Amino acid sequence: MIRRRKLAKWLAVLVALHGVIACAGFVAPYDPVAQDRQHPYAPPSKLHFLDKQGRVHMRPFLYPLRMREGLFNQYEEDTARTIPLKFFVDGSRYKLLGLVPSRLHLFGVDDARVYLLGSDAMAAINLQGSSMAVRFRSWLVGSGPESHFSSASASVR
């Protein structure tokens, strides 16, 4: 009985992960090829509920990042302004489950970028790239590479 419960929990986790992978465009706030050249090597954004005056906010927010003066890859939060995190926002186009065109994203902000995993040298936002890469790997591993390449190699012959 305990083994079945443990198996059911792991199965639920796997189903949830595959659901997130299948809906990667919805979970990621931006297009996977989007770049923000103003913020290369940006660190992950910190979500806050408590501002610098000590007030509690019911909605999570972030402070915009600004590059430190004279430094190329070090950032600091601009605490003069808060940017609320919004849920179910319009954004870049994608296809939900690879079929249904949509612009609805799980979260986003106005007039800034959310870097939940930071950005790289090209200022690509890592969360989007990660979610799309996981989707591709899952597609290859989940259904077996031979089924995807056998029809392509048959048409070449």
Image: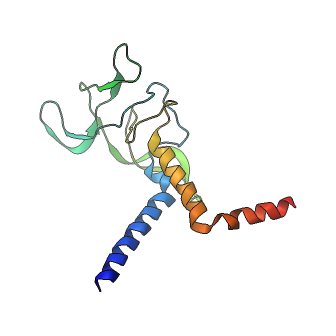
- Residue found 55% across the figure and 50% down from its top: 94
110 left or right of 37 in image: left
Please tell me whether residue 90 is drawn above or below residue 44 in the rendered image: below
Viewer-closest of 58 and 52 = 52
The answer to which image quadrant residue 156 occupies is bottom right
Scheme of colours in the image: rainbow
21 left or right of 116 in image: right
Indicate the quadrant containing the N terminus: top left, top right, bottom left or bottom right: bottom left
The answer to which image quadrant residue 112 occupies is top left
Count of numbered marks = 0
Q: Which residue lies furthest to the top in this view?
A: 70
Viewer-closest of 101 and 52 = 52
- Residue found 16% across the figure and 30% down from its top: 52
Q: Can residue 78 be seen in this view?
A: yes
- Residue 130 point in image, percent of width and height: 48, 47
Q: Residue furthest left?
A: 54
Indicate the quadrant containing the C terminus: top left, top right, bottom left or bottom right: bottom right
Please tell me whether residue 32 is drawn above or below residue 74 in the rendered image: below
- Residue found 32% across the figure and 29% down from its top: 64
Q: Is residue 103 visible?
A: no
- Residue 108 point in image, percent of width and height: 39, 43
33 left or right of 61 in image: right
- Residue 136 point in image, percent of width and height: 57, 55
Q: Which residue lies furthest to the right in this view?
A: 157
- Residue found 63% across the figure and 67% down from its top: 144
110 left or right of 26 in image: left
- Residue 48 point in image, percent of width and height: 23, 40
Q: Residue furthest front?
A: 3
